Amino acid sequence: MRTIVQISLDLTTIADALETAEMAIGAGVDWLEAGTPLIIAEGMNSVRALRKAFPEVPIVADLKAMDGGWSEAKLVAKAGATHVVVMERAHKETVQEVVRAGRDFGVKVMCDNMAAEDMVAAAARIQELGCDFVVHHIGYDHRRGIAAAGGPMPSPLDQLREVVQAVSIPVQAVGGLSAEQAMRTPEYGAPLVVLGAPLVIEAHAFRAAGGDTEKQLRMICEHVHAYGEVGPKEPG
């Protein structure tokens, strides 16, 4: 599929999310993500507000769904999301229910392998369960805990090639990547580039980062889009 830049709106107010989204779209970002903090703080109103403001832009709802899969996926679809995130660590029935809802309501399913003991095997399971995308994810608390204990900082790049090779659906890598690392994920075969903390969002405060973010985003988008087609075709 063609390379895609997705911005993670891990903010806590609709006003901040809309302001950041407008800047991001102006800089060339392709997809908007209603981040988990935004959904917790503002619920489906955040998705509705993004859909109203950006009627033609794909919107990912990062629910991190763990149960009640069909009903939760229906909620985000009715609110205007085009993609929904479910956790691979959920019961397989939950993942299957999100997939069923995706088919019923026309949303794509992104499945997150965070906390899997074998992340490569988890990616293969995600594909077997009928999901459309793999989110290869090293969690924020996990990274901080290992760093505090003096261990080597884990990165989604550590196994990204193996994850990409294990599946025939598109992959995105998430978790502590610098802007430079995120821009290089298409070189690993992962066409979906996600930008969030610390470039766009201050992770500790859930607020927009300072500096000339729009200029940097524009440069990143131009670099990522220059890769063209990477990995498998986007699911139809």
Image (cartoon, grey):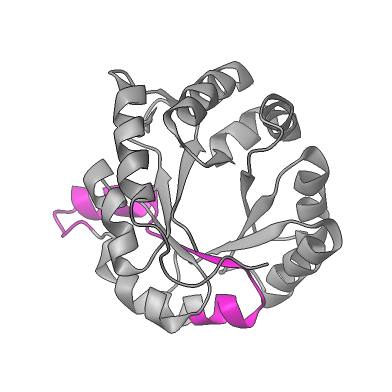
Q: Position of residue 158 (x, y in %)?
A: 25, 68
Quarter where residue 50 is shown: top right
Residue 132 falls inside the magenta stretch: yes
Q: Is residue 59 above or below residue 236?
A: above
The residue closer to the viewer here, 35 or 53, is 53
Q: Position of residue 49 (x, y in %)?
A: 71, 26
Which contiguous range is marked in magenta?
124-153
Q: Is residue 175 above or below residue 100?
A: above
Q: Position of residue 117 (x, y in %)?
A: 41, 75
Q: Residue at x 61, y 83 (%)?
A: 128
Quadrant of image for the C terminus: bottom right
Question: Would residue 136 be seen by someone viewing this image from the given angle?
Answer: no
Residue 189 falls inside the magenta stretch: no
The residue closer to the viewer here, 106 or 152, is 106
Q: Residue at x 68, y 59 (%)?
A: 108
The residue closer to the viewer here, 114 or 167, is 167
